[in-house]
């Protein structure tokens, strides 16, 4: 019982390990499929968010351009430009103030005349817009935004870079992101009279970029065309280009390869540094919109830029931590399934190991039974062989006690047949194969025994055997052995009179269909009129009968050096 338990445990462990391996591989495939699906879904959601924010930013900026065009075309403003009407001037101030109040997007709205002097300025004043008195208006003719805007043609719009507001030569605190957007103003004679300029709150853009998405910890960020952060979750990195001590801190320096890929196309998805970056390009400058390099100094000059060089890169990064959390979520979702698979694996292992154990036990019992039957069959062959040897000895004793020479031939023939059969059982008993006989070894020993039993002088008769290495069933081997035995006895009795020397040859070959046996001696030969069917010899009758038993046919060549040819079908096995 203990051995059976050990065997059962062995089969269980073996099957369980195989089952565990298969289920582990299956679980890994399911996990990575679910993880990749979730990751792809997450990437798609963030891509949609980027496009929504992209559209929203462009919508805000298009509203600014629309406001500037509306202001420049108001009838009262046209009257003021063309006729310098005081009443119209007051109305224009009120319209500018109303726009500033309603929009809440402009820190300042100004009309600056062609000399560079502020004529109208509305300050947002923390949500309480005010009209700046004439005595507080300033000269701005030396500022880059005035010069760059005033150079434009009718219908063109100027966008300054998105940077921080500067007051009195210093960056305003707290930091105030700003874009200065302006258009030139022409009178009815198409004479340039000045510019309308708004200081657009850049935080409107920053708020769109930084708006949380479903409590996500993934970080959106905004880069300018020189890879400086305009917004990121790390405030110390933002607006570095505005500060001399930080003007070399940019995205390109930290992630040069990623920046090159982001810069190379308008939008896309890339995996790098164990993170996923999703990005798009915001290009606010359309036809008739111009821009310049701007300046971090109040009075520095700027240079006009090609509109294609003015863009922002809006991006979001799915950090290694985000992806790790995603893997944990997928693993948590799959945990019940994995537990179920594990339990199913144990049950399957128990069932299969039980079935395997029962099968193996049955095989062992079958092998044991076959071994016992084989042992029993060997014992039977051994006893049959001994019994036949005993019968042969009794015949020998009886022949020695009986002096009648007429009976010698009968006793010799009978004894030879019994020994022929006994020899087969000897081979079966001694061989590992208890059903088949090696024909070559069997016939060699049989013929040698025949020569010895018939007291042939040494060297008088020799054997010449050419037998292929064949294994035949015992029944067929006995029939062939009896045929060869009868023929050899006949040769020894009649072919070599007066102790003549001679050769007995046996050749056995086979094809895919037949076995061929050729028996021949070089004695005096058969009579030319010999016909086996007419022979009354018991031996010849036996040969003919055994040939029919093997479903074979016999051909006889008579005369000197005559021979017997037997053909048997291969299926006798």
Image (cartoon, rainbow, N blue to C red):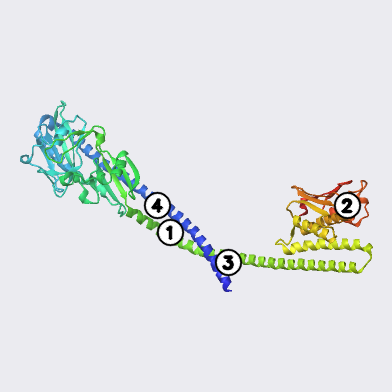
Vertical order, 97 against 358 (above or below): above
Instruction: Give the numbered dot on residue 354.
Output: 3
Q: Secondary structure at mark 1?
A: helix
Q: Name the residue furthest left.
A: 135
Instruction: Give the numbered dot on residue 80.
Output: none
Residue carrying label 2: 495
Residue carrying label 4: 38
Query: Can see residue 195?
Result: yes
N-terminal label among 1 and 2: 1
Q: Name the residue furthest top.
A: 189
Vertical order, 297 against 569 (above or below): above
Gap between marks 4 and 2 measured at Cα = 99 Å
Q: Residue at 84% of width from left, 51% of height from top? A: 502
Instruction: Name the mark nearer the viewer: 2 or 3.
Output: 2
Residue carrying label 1: 334
Q: Secondary structure at mark 3?
A: helix
- Left or right side of 271 for 310: left
Where on the picture, by quarter, is residue 307?
top left
Gap between marks 1 and 2 measured at Cα = 94 Å
Instruction: Name the mark nearer the viewer: 1 or 2.
Output: 2
- Left or right side of 318 for 230: left
Vertical order, 37 against 143 (above or below): below
Q: In front: 459, or 351?
A: 459
């Amino acid at each position: 019982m203990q051995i059976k338990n050990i065997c059962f445990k062995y089969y269980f462990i073996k099957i369980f390990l195989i089952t565990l391996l298969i289920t582990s591989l299956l679980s890994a495939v399911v996990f990575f499929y679910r993880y990749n699906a979730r990751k792809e879904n997450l990437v798609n959601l963030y891509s949609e968010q980027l496009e929504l924010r992209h559209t929203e930013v462009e919508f805000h900026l298009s509203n600014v351009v629309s406001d500037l065009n509306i202001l420049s075309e108001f009838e009262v403003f046209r009257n003021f430009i063309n006729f310098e009407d005081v009443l119209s001037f007051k109305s224009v101030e009120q319209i500018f103030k109303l726009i500033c109040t309603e929009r809440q997007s402009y820190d300042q709205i100004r009309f600056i005349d062609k000399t560079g002097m502020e004529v109208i300025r509305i300050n947002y004043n923390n949500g309480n817009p005010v009209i700046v008195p004439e005595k507080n208006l300033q000269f701005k003719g030396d500022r880059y935004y005035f010069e760059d805007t005033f150079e434009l043609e009718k219908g063109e719009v100027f966008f300054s870079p998105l940077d921080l507001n500067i007051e009195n030569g210093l960056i305003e605190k707290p930091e105030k992101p700003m874009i200065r957007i302006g258009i030139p103003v022409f009178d009815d004679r198409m004479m340039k009279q000045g510019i309308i300029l708004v200081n657009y709150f850049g935080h409107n853009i920053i708020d769109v970029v930084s708006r949380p998405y479903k409590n996500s910890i993934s970080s959106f960020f905004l880069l300018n065309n020189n890879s400086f952060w305009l917004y990121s979750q790390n405030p110390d990195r933002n607006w570095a280009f505005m500060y001399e001590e930080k003007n070399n801190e940019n995205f390109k320096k930290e992630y040069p390869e990623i920046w090159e890929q982001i810069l190379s196309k308008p939008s896309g998805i890339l995996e790098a540094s164990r993170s996923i970056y999703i990005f798009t390009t915001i290009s606010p400058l359309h036809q008739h919109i111009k821009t310049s390099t701007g300046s971090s100094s109040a009075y520095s000059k700027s240079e006009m830029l090609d509109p294609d060089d003015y863009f922002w890169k809006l991006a979001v990064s799915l950090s290694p931590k985000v992806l790790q959390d995603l893997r944990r979520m997928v693993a948590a979702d799959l945990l019940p399934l994995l537990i179920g698979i594990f339990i199913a694996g144990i049950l399957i292992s128990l069932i299969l190991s039980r079935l395997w154990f029962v099968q193996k036990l049955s095989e062992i019992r079958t092998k044991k039974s076959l071994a016992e039957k084989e042992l029993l069959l060997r014992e039977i062959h051994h006893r049959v062989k001994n019994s036949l040897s005993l019968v042969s000895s009794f015949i020998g004793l009886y022949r020695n006690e009986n002096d009648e020479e007429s009976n010698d031939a009968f006793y010799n023939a009978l004894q030879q047949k019994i020994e022929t059969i006994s020899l087969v059982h000897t081979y079966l008993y001694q061989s590992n194969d208890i059903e088949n006989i090696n024909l070559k070894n069997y016939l060699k020993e049989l013929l040698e025994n025949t020569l010895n039993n018939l007291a042939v002088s040494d060297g008088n008769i020799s054997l010449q055997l050419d037998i292929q290495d064949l294994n035949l069933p015992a029944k067929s081997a006995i029939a062939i052995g009896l045929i060869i035995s009868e023929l050899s006895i006949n040769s020894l009795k009649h072919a070599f009179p007066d102790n003549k020397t001679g050769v007995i040859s046996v050749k056995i070959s086979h094809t895919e269909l037949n076995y061929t046996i050729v028996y021949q001696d070089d004695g005096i030969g058969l009579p030319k009129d010999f016909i086996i069917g007419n022979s009354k010899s018991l031996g010849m009758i036996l040969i003919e009968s055994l040939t029919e038993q093997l479903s074979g046919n016999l051909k006889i060549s008579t005369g000197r050096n005559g021979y017997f040819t037997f053909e048997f079908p291969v299926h006798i096995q």
